[in-house]
Amino acid sequence: VLEHRSPREAPEQRRSSMKYTVVAVLLLASGSSAIELTPATWDEKTAGKSILVKFFAPWCGHCKKLKPDWDKLMEDFKDSPKALVADVDCTAEGQPLCEKHGVSGYPTLKYGDPGDLKAYEGGRTYNDLKKFAEENLGPTCGPGENLELCDAETKPK
């Protein structure tokens, strides 16, 4: 038995299907480039790299405002051999990292050597963040670490 549908019903069903497809694609795309650091992943993911980290809380309004630009920046640097742009969720697994790095407000941005982070005090737009990252993030150079990526000034003697 074939089910009979009115001509008006079919476009409504197609629109409904399309809405679900669009929502699914947006959900997949929105989380695809996020790099979230935890105590378990910190050493492995930051090894030999300069980092720019956003310490945040999911409920924080300023964090939500920064998220689109920050996600775009993470995407830009996701394949970099010398720099890492990442997140630390201070309300979840990342909470011990937030304590260790003296985070007391959200979002807090820090950068530099993973063992000696400095406070980021610059602008919070995508262009400001990207310019800063391009000019300030580079390989961490130490005995046996990324020597091929280091310039003469930063190479250990």
Image (spheres, helix red, strand yellow):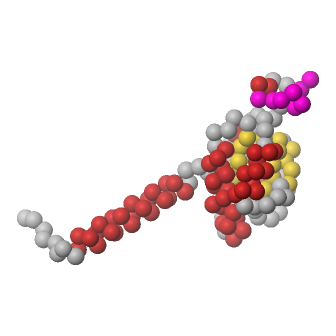
Q: Residue at x 81, y 45 (%)?
A: 136
Which residue lies most toward the right here? 157
Q: Residue at x 33, y 69 (%)?
A: 15
Q: Judge whether residue 49 is colored magenta.
A: no
Q: Quadrant of residue 17?
A: bottom left
**Is the residue 144 above or below the residue 107 in the image?**
above
Q: Main secondary structure of the magenta part?
A: loop
Q: Quadrant of the C terminus?
A: top right
Inspect this view and state whether residue 120 appears: yes
**Is the residue 59 above or below the residue 69 in the image?**
below
> Looking at the picture, how far across and down is residue 93, in whole percent?
68, 53
Q: Which residues are magenta?
A: 149-157
Q: Residue at x 70, y 57 (%)?
A: 126
Viewer-nearest residue: 125 or 36: 125
> Looking at the picture, how far across and down is residue 12, in whole percent?
29, 72
State left or right for residue 154 relative to residue 138. right
**Is the residue 81 above or below the residue 92 in the image?**
above
Q: Quadrant of residue 13?
A: bottom left
